[in-house]
Image (tube, rainbow, N blue to C red):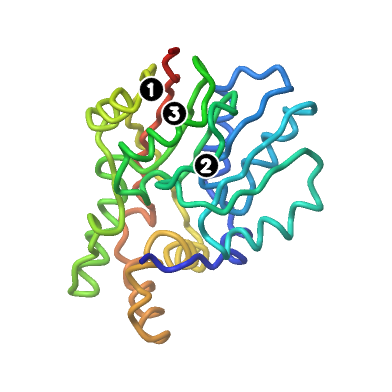
Amino acid sequence: MLNDWDSKTYSTLELPHLNWGKKAIGHLDLAGNETIADLGAGTGRDSFALAKLLPKGKVIMVERSRAMLATLREQLKDHPGTFEVIEADLLSPFGLPNSCDGAISVAAFHWIHDHLTLFKNIAAILKDDCPLVADCGGETNIAQVIACYEEVSKTSADAKEIWNFSSVADAKENLQAAGLSPESVVLEEDPLYLKNKDELETFLRTIVLKDQIAKYESIDQKKIIQEVAEKLPNKSIDYVRLKIIAKKLGS
């Protein structure tokens, strides 16, 4: 079981996820009256941006983390739009058969090990010929961060147990097997440079290495994060994004 998020700190960070979300939303051809699912909605940043483009539509926010959901619900009152919040694991059917005109997901799929079941569940909620647009960690994502952590801690990062950084070929195969036609599936390097030491350490502690350091006492967590931050080339996090645009095949 992965450790839950520090959603309060997460929601204050200047995340690259914002740009990833904007790009994902930009691939949707919206009239303004659609129902769109945000899968792994987190604290709702992409959902709130999406709602501005759907004055007569609805955003369905699907999230498993109770910490994220608590922060999301606190913020709902500050954002106009029509929302439905569903607490669900993306590996379980989430009860929206053929009801969505599209789905987006940003920085969520790499936390899920069974992508075939994931994509089947997504296909089940989409209307025919409607799109899935997703951005997640892909093959070789954060390889330098993992190497630095393992050097500092002298332990394995358990990367394959924690993440599923899919290749393009595997993603295409799973999409097709789930009834989703892959229109574009690519890997894109997108390094994040954080020159501010405190910001880099907070980012590593809150997001990238949260599960690795959870087993340590607080003082050791701080020491490990500081040493990893010092070792990172160019003080950067070597993100490699898997970008997916697919469409549900018509029956």
Q: CA distance from mark 1 to mark 2?
A: 16 Å
Question: Residue 180 got which mark?
Answer: 1
Residue found at x 52% / y 63%: 199
Residue 2 image-quadrant placement: bottom left
Marks 2 and 3 close (CB-CB < 8 Å): no
Q: Check disc 2: other Cα within 10 Å, few if <14, some if 14-19, many if 20+.
A: many
What's the residue type where badge 3 is placed? Ala
Q: Secondary structure at mark 2?
A: strand
Q: Secondary structure at mark 1?
A: strand
- Residue located beneath label 3 in the image: 123
Marks 3 and 1 close (CB-CB < 8 Å): yes
Q: Is residue 174 left or right of residue 45?
A: left
Q: Earlier in the sequence, mark 3 or mark 1?
A: 3
Task: Between residue 181 and residue 195, name the one nearer to us.
Answer: 181
Question: Residue 221 got which mark?
Answer: none
Q: Earlier in the sequence, mark 1 or mark 2?
A: 2
- Residue located beneath label 2 in the image: 39
Q: Check disc 1: other Cα within 10 Å, few if <14, some if 14-19, many if 20+.
A: many
Q: Secondary structure at mark 3?
A: helix
